[in-house]
Amino acid sequence: MTDAVRARFERFAAEEAPGRSDVYAEWAAGIAADADVQEVLARIPETHRQPPLVFAVTRMQGATAGPYPQWRRFVLAHADAVVAECTRRRVQTNEPLRLAPLLPVLSRIEGPVALLEIGAAAGLCLYPDRYSYRLRDADGALRLALDPRGGASPVVLTSTVTGPLPPLRMPEVVWRAGIDLAPLDARSSADRDWMRSLVWPGETEREERITAALDIAAADPPLLVAGDAAERIDELAARAPADATLVITTPGVLVYLPRAARLALISRIRALPARWITIDAPGLHDAWDPPLDAGAWRGSAVALDGRVMVAADPLGRWWEWRTGNRADAA
């Protein structure tokens, strides 16, 4: 089992951490060469052993974002607590910036909108109408600024956009709800600390964005229910206002489900009287229209009811309108 730990953290150090966090790259490389720490982490169930989750848990427990030997000492001294906390926790990225590539898709849905997110965590992706958007070209020049009706938001979602801009507008959201195995409360100091621990060291702008989004959610909390989405989605969807368009979103959550459960949930969503927006890796499922060539597709795909409209960074840092219909472009 330690071989699996070594391979996973070795891959993270080589492919995922570089360019995002020097600290996490160093920690992962250290683990890949450290049999003692591998033995500790091997005690964590595989589905709870993702490097960002392990690192976030240790930081929440008191490990500082310093050199690997210092982090190693902390893990070995608190091994039982680290294993127990990782076993009960899940990755809950809850990155509001994911809404940037979802905005052009939301803009095509007539309001008012009742928004229901699966894997909602603290619900930070349920406020597309409360955030400001700044779309820039590859050189950083501003292409479009869009603010909520009341003016600029403390949460500013900045993305690089290539290609034509489709018509964009602020959605009218009248109901916000979410399902999560372990919902987080933006009003809880413990949950807020956990959310900040999930931000990688060095991502200062992201930490500020999530903190500001937590304040917005705390001031007007969404309806969040705990449980399995497949078991609770019909019940929650039925609570949406009848005079609003129900929009179900699955931003970045389907990857955490086993394939059979993932496909069953997609079928359940599509059977409801609702629109469905998702952002996923092309090879994650086959619900795309038209079908996608995963090897030729750049980034993740954003789709409305399965119809692919946008290619995007999975966290929303860039996106490109890909319907091929320039008549839709602004």
Image (cartoon, rainbow, N blue to C red):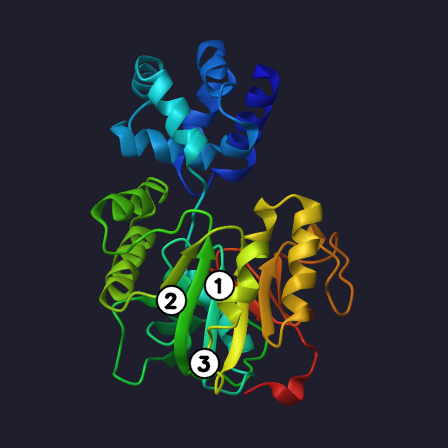
Q: Nearer the viewer, residue 304 or 70?
A: 304
Q: Which residue is mark 2?
A: 157
Residue 226 higher or lower than 26, as above or below: below
Element type where label 3 sits in the image: loop
Q: What residue appears at the point 21 percent right and 47 percent down from the top-left corner?
A: 189
Q: CA distance from mark 3 to mark 1?
A: 15 Å
Q: Nearer the viewer, residue 237 or 276?
A: 237
Q: CA distance from mark 2 to mark 1?
A: 19 Å
Question: If the image is split into quadrants, where does the C terminus sit?
Answer: bottom right
Q: Which residue is mark 1?
A: 117
Label number found at residue 265:
none
Query: Upstream in the sequence, badge 2 or badge 3?
Result: 2
Query: Upstream in the sequence, badge 2 or badge 1?
Result: 1
Q: Which residue is mark 3?
A: 241
Residue 279 placed where, x, y %?
58, 61
Q: What residue appears at the point 25 percent right and 84 percent down from the top-left corner?
A: 150
Mark 2 is on which residue type?
Leu
Element type where label 1 sits in the image: strand
**Residue 87 left/right relative to 66:** right
Q: How busy is the neighbourhood of tag 2: few (under 14 within 10 Å), some, or many (20 plus)? A: many
Q: Is residue 64 visible?
A: no
Kindly report which numbered mark, 2 or 3, lies closer to the viewer in this rendering: 3
Kindly report which numbered mark, 3 or 1, lies closer to the viewer in this rendering: 3
Q: What residue appears at the point 26 percent right and 66 percent down from the top-left corner?
A: 216
